[in-house]
């Protein structure tokens, strides 16, 4: 009887059966599915975060002047009420009695070359009380870089920013789609926006500061 051509008939079936033996042994005979490995390139869930955002304290009215740390007139500095708010700001955080917010582990303020100093003035007393330096290397307009630094650093974090740039900061954080978030910062100086990320999901709450007479 002539030999069957290579790759056809019984001989081909025998070769295939022999090739499948190691595969069957590897998979096992119990019918259980082999363990699955994580998908290649899958990203871990982002770490939990708490980011508190405030506007700088009160600035001078149009045509008026604030004053700097030395008491000199300076239109780019805080007004008198703004300085009083800055002095009272530590009362919002532990170890102050009845504090409603977590103690910041990092403090950021708008800065950069030629930037107004009101944000840094607002958080100076707080940073001193916390014994934490103020990070002011980011200018208004650099919100993506600021957000990256905030989320990469210790938590909780506090950011004092110009109100026009706060929506850009929130978007850069990835928290812009949370329920209840206003489209822009209200025309107020006495609020705190707190963003909390748990298991990759952001939540939001707005809190009144209630530090000075006349605060809502």
Image (cartoon, rainbow, N blue to C red):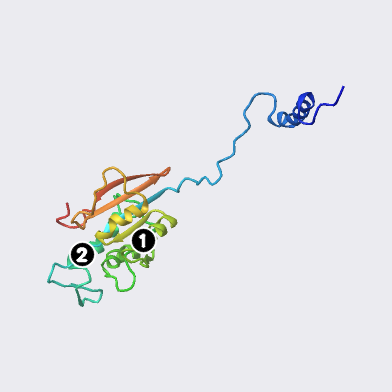
Q: Nearer the viewer, residue 191 or 140?
A: 140
Going 28% across and 46% down the picture, which residue do you hit?
205
Which corner quadrant of the image does residue 133 belong to?
Answer: bottom left
Percent across and percent down for residue 62 are 13, 68
Indicate the secondary structure of the residue bearing disc 1.
strand
Circle 2 sits in a helix, a strand or a loop, which is it?
helix
Q: What distance separates the C-alpha of mark 2 from that of mark 1?
A: 18 Å
Q: Position of residue 188 (x, y in %)?
A: 19, 56
Does residue 129 show up? Answer: no
Question: Which image quarter holds the N terminus?
Answer: top right
Q: Residue furthest left?
A: 63
Q: Quadrant of residue 36?
A: top right
44 horizontally vs 81: left or right = right
> What is the crowding at mark 2: few (fewer than 14 residues within 10 Å), some, or many (at least 20)?
many
Badge number at residue 82: 2
Q: Residue furthest right?
A: 1
User: Which disc is residue 163 wearing?
Assistant: none
**Residue sitting at x 29%, y 42%:** 179
Q: Are the residues flagged by discs 2 and 1 in contact, CB closer than 8 Å?
A: no
**Residue 176 x, y percent position in the rendering:** 31, 49
Image-based side of 188 in relation to 130, left or right: left
Dot placed on the residue nearer the N-terminal end, 2 or 1: 2
Q: Is residue 193 above or below residue 88?
A: above
Farthest residue toward the top?
1
Side (left or right) of 80 relative to 138: left
Q: Residue at x 81, y 26 (%)?
A: 4
Horizontal and vertical percent for residue 199? Answer: 43, 42
Residue holding disc 1 = 107
């Amino acid at each position: 009887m002539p030999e069957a051509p290579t790759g056809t008939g019984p001989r081909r079936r025998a070769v295939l059966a022999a090739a499948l033996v190691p595969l069957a042994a590897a998979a096992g005979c119990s019918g259980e599915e082999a363990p699955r490995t994580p998908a290649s390139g899958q990203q871990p869930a982002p770490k939990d975060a708490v980011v508190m955002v405030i506007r700088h304290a009160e600035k001078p009215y149009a045509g008026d002047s604030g004053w700097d740390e030395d008491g000199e007139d300076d239109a780019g500095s805080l007004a008198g009420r703004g300085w009083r708010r800055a002095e009272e700001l530590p009362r919002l955080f532990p170890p102050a009695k009845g504090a409603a917010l977590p103690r910041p582990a990092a403090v950021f303020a708008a800065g950069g070359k030629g930037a107004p100093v009101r944000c840094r003035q607002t958080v100076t007393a707080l940073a001193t009380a916390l014994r934490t330096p103020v990070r002011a290397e980011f200018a208004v307009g650099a919100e993506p870089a600021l957000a990256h630094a905030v989320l990469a650093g210790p938590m909780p974090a506090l950011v004092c920013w110009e109100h026009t740039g706060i929506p850009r900061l929130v978007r850069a954080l990835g928290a812009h789609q949370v329920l209840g978030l206003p489209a822009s910062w209200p025309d107020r100086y006495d609020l705190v926006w707190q963003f909390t990320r748990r298991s990759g999901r952001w939540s939001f709450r707005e809190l009144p500061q209630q530090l000075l007479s006349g605060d809502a």
